[in-house]
Amino acid sequence: MRVLGIETSCDETAAAVVTEGGDVLSDVVRSQVALHAPYGGVVPEVAARDHARAVVPVVREALSRAGVSAADLDGVAVTSRPGLAGALLVGLQAAKGLAWAAGKPLVGVDHLVGHLLAVFLRRSGAPLPDEHERPSFPYVALLASGGHTAIYRVDGPAIGAIRELGATRDDAAGEAFDKVAKLLGLGYPGGPVVDRLAAGGDAAAAADAVPALMARKESLEFSFSGIKSAVARHVAKRGRPEGQALRDLCAAFQGAVVDALVQKTVRAARAEGIGRVVLAGGVAANQGLRATMAAACERRGLALFVPPFASCTDNGAMIAYAGALRLAAGERDTLDLAPETRTALPRVTRKGGGAR
Ligand code: KG4
Ligand code: ZN
């Protein structure tokens, strides 16, 4: 089975052709980062307009790199939720037009399910993972991106087999990286820059600027807005740090975020009695997170599965793969499929303040 996946939920226009076994035949990602950078974040209207310009060329390129035409496809998968409504609409309309014209089945994919299954993708160029480099079900997954941060128990690829164990009450982890980077004048998106600076910093030297994030240790919920406010107060009082002081502050901030992510993920795995942990989402690219999670899993005898960078950040391949599994299960959507801003995965964590 060869499935085209189209992703336009946020600030990447992406398309890919993937088999139901997870082999990535092509994967084209066109980032809008430069377009949104002057505003310090994604501007929804700007995103939707650029998707409209990019979606047809990106889909064409994905088909041509895979060496297939629309007639060769077994289906068209598209991100239908969650995301920016106007941005989602562009991908949905493109997918519907193509599916209708080529007479192929259409399936909508929940973007978060795509992230949670991206660990199964096989990319040529990267060493082919053997069976023990792909997890079996069930596994516990930490999904940390710019829009979402949650821990899930994944018993299978269907929506009904995925359960949220805990999520953020306020900002997503990537959002915290982006907001702190903006406060420090480091540009957008902030994750990669803070990651780089943190590597040369000493967290202990800036510990007073950053509060601990683990108010209630047994909870699996996160909160990242307090740490952002603490950095804002620090900058208001002392000005933007430079040189070593900047690197120290980045290390302290990143260390606090990473510790919360790692400790709660490991606790979730132990509470569920599951020995496999999977990382997903753009923040999974963070060097500090990868290293700290690897050490914590090794100490506790947990097997850790970390997808390559291209599978962590937004891409069409994860959407194509999740769609291929839906098609293989006999599922289809109709041409009245509409965008939804929320995920279909039930939330257990309520937004808002309080201890956690
Ligand atoms: O998954 P993704 O590409 O898009 C969303 O679905 O949100 O994640 C993007 C987020 C951004 O907030 C970005 O700052 C963050 O991932 N990110 C990182 C790193 N690389 C990307 N955060 C921390 N460290 C990184 N190295
Ligand atoms: Zn994403």
Image (spheres, rainbow, N blue to C red):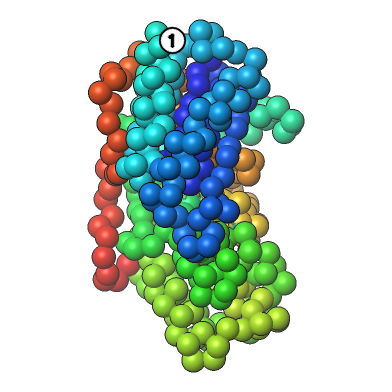
Name the residue at the bottom extreme. 237
Q: Amino acid at mark 1?
A: Ala
Whether residue 194 is visible to the viewer of this picture, yes or no, is yes
Report x, y in % for residue 177.
51, 64
Give me the residue at 70% from left, 27% from top. 124
Report x, y in % for residue 255.
57, 69
So how many labels did they put on this image?
A: 1
Q: Is residue 207 above or below residue 213?
A: below
- Quarter the C terminus occupies: bottom left
Report x, y in % for residue 230.
44, 80
Give me the residue at 61% from left, 84% from top. 241
Give me the residue at 60% from left, 13% from top. 68
Query: Closest to the observer: 9 or 296?
Result: 9
> Is the residue marked 1 within 8 Å of ligand 2, measured from its CB?
no
Q: Is residue 325 above or below residue 70?
A: below
Q: Is residue 99 above or below residue 117?
A: above
Give me the residue at 51% from left, 84% from top. 235
Packing grade of label 1 (10 A; few <14, some 14-19, many >=20) is some
Name the element at disc 1.
helix
Report x, y in % for residue 18.
56, 22
Whether residue 16 is visible to the viewer of this picture, yes or no, is no
Query: Closest to the observer: 47 or 63?
Result: 47
Please give left or right for residue 155 compared with residue 122 in the image: left
Q: For mark 1, what is the residue? A: 102
Q: Is residue 254 above or below residue 308?
A: below
